[in-house]
Amino acid sequence: MKKIKTIAGVTWMLFLFCISPEITGQETSPFILTDQFGYLPQATKTAVIKNPKIGFDNGNSFSPGPVYQVVNAATNQSVFQDAPVAYNNGVTDTDSGDQIWWFDFSSVSVPGKYYILDVANNVKSYPFHIGENVYNDVLKHAVRMFFYQRAGCEKLARFAGEGWADGASHVGPLQDKNCRLYNKKSDMATERDLHGGWYDAGDYNKYTNWACNYIEWMMLSYLENPEIWTDDYNIPESGNGIPDLLDEAKWGMDWLLRMQEQDGSVLSIVGLSSASPPSAAKGQSLYGPASTMSTTSAAKAFAIGYKVFKQIGLTEYAGQLQTAALKAWNWAEQNPNVIFHNNSSDNGSTGLGAGDQEVEGDYNRKAIRMTAALYLYEMTGEKQYLSVFENGYTVLPLIAWNNDMQQYWSSDHFLCFYYLSLDGISGTVKNRIISALKTAFNKPENYAGKIGKDGYRSFIKDYNWGSNKYKSDYGMTFYFFSDQSLEPDKNRLYADAAEDYLHYIHGVNPMGFVYLTNMNTYGASKSLTEIYHTWYDHNSVKWDKVSPTSYGPAPGYLSGGPNENYKWDGCCPNNCGSSGNNSQCTSEEIPVNQPAAKMYKDFNTSWPLNSWEITEPMGAYQMAYIRLLSKFVSKKNNNSLTNTVVPEQPEVYPNPAKGLIYVRFQKEPISQLDLFDVQMRLLKTQPVNGNFVQLDVSSYPPAIYFLRITTAHKNYLQRIIIQK
């Protein structure tokens, strides 16, 4: 029983010492949002409750009850209760179009599986875990995205899973091992062996400048938290004694070494043909010439790679990278103005790649050069490299634009943080940078000035193309302020803020999505089913969308995210070349005139709906997220899984079934069974406790269904057939 009374305007909830019996018939509510993977025990934990006011979902209003509980999913007993608090006095949040409440349950720290219950409405959130290792497996799958993106690598079923097994791509005649210069397709003298590397995004092209960034960020992610990186990610190199993150980085680095010419210059791009699956692509591979910036970018990747691989004992490989870094730097210094724009009619490179990899703007080129110089300073100890930064850093917006920090210049203020970590630096430069960082960070219109002023607790200035990367970059900025103690009294505040950006990607967002693909088997309840990608093509029978008959995209890809500037192609609705093309403009609903954070749809339809503007993945998005996620992965018991692709599965039989279904799982007790139809609508929930349980399905019509089997540590989803 409960009693609610008001004293001096404050509502108090008084409950009997013995918690009331389980409330039955609870439905999962799309309006109660939590991190679907979970929370670290000591983390600040805040559920967001929304009432849509503006946008596609504004017809589904929700009024939260006065009492919210945290319920142990295994026992169905409440462990904490309180009232949700209106955000911004109930004023609608601009970015989301939602009226919002926050429910703080930070005091709940005992490991286990839980859900949030709205007592009056008898609805609950998706389940989540509290524990030291809630993000460990998520990190593994996020890193494994790069394995699926490997060019020239056979993806055996034991590593990729049966659904994504594929032969090595782009290694046939006139492909990557016999790659030719883009404007000399028939000239054998231009052939280079350029196999390996990663598909950059939804396309299969390999861009030097961008791949160098991914390698650099992998190295930094390792250096910033080396103890968490393990050797059990179930990639071909697993078990070789080297953390699998570094094995993956080496796959990219080996390709980068192949891209380097004898004179030290580094080729700019390899354009690959398209097909689904990748091994079906048979077109010729072509490369673009070296440029100053592709070579400078390679110098930074080689130099920081030297530091890491030497640190882990691969001294011979580190020496190779050291030589490559110096050769690249020297060539770029001697050739400072070599520019190559790919996919350009001006030089006949139309069709070579999808995006232009050339670095635009004098400022951006200087920033990359300064980054390479700092890594070369660490590698050699020579002050000439340090002076490149210390004599040039004033061009950074942080200094040049009156203490300015923006989401578009994250890599530059990350560079400043890296400089502050080095030995032997100028005290004057150090103090000026620290002062500028603190001033910029605390301006009221951005970063620390916006803590507590975003309904979903993860403010960014603009929801542009790649907003999920910006979310991760903001989180990393808060993390660096905390980690380097620039304002010691705010360390916890900033660390909590960093973690909130992670929660946004994991489901605390207006769409209620985990913005990663196909993660429902690995802890998510509502992950993405589609992305824009050549392999996982819209017309693919196997990979278009996660469904009972399609594998969908491989697990762990981060999509670009909401984009307030998204729209269909300019040819729509009547000028796309044919009536058939024109009809595609209205073939399905797309996000139009939505609040910025709702400018998203889980789809991958190509031109003219241009889904790539919101759902395409990219190595840059992925690494920004991985770098942030890795800061909250536990060092304890990090080898909890032996196989991240095909975990031990419960037995479900008979299947097909007519009356009763039996579920047996010797590994650990089952706490709940949930039955869904093919549209993933919840039909039945049955709390249980044991290793052998049964479910009565006799009342359901013949069809395909899904059974979710919940334990204290994981959800398992299995397809079943009910017959009469």
Image (spheres, helix red, strand yellow):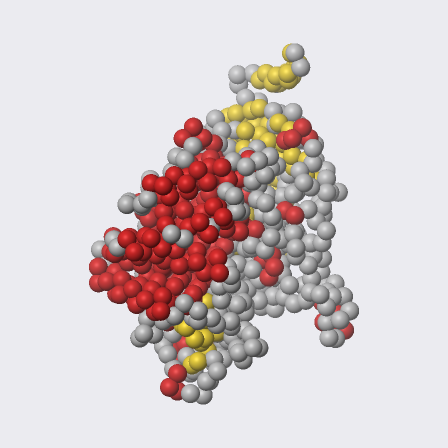
User: Does residue 195 appear in the picture of this structure?
Assistant: no
Q: Residue at x 46, y 85 (%)?
A: 185
User: Does residue 173 appear in the picture of this structure?
Assistant: yes
**Which sits in the foreground, 130 or 175?**
175
Q: Residue at x 54, y 29 (%)?
A: 104
**Which sits in the foreground, 265 or 38?**
265
Q: Please give left or right for residue 702 compared with residue 265 in the image.
A: right
Q: Residue at x 61, y 49 (%)?
A: 463
Residue 426: quadrant of the picture: top left
Q: Quadrant of the C terminus?
A: bottom right
Residue at far top of view = 8
Question: Where in the figure is residue 21, as x and y percent of width and height?
Answer: 57, 25
Q: Quadrant of the N terminus?
A: top right
Number of marks present in the image shown: 0
Relative to 631, say whether 244 is above or below: below
**Which sits in the foreground, 369 or 140?**
369
Question: Where in the figure is residue 639, as x and y percent of width and height?
Answer: 33, 46
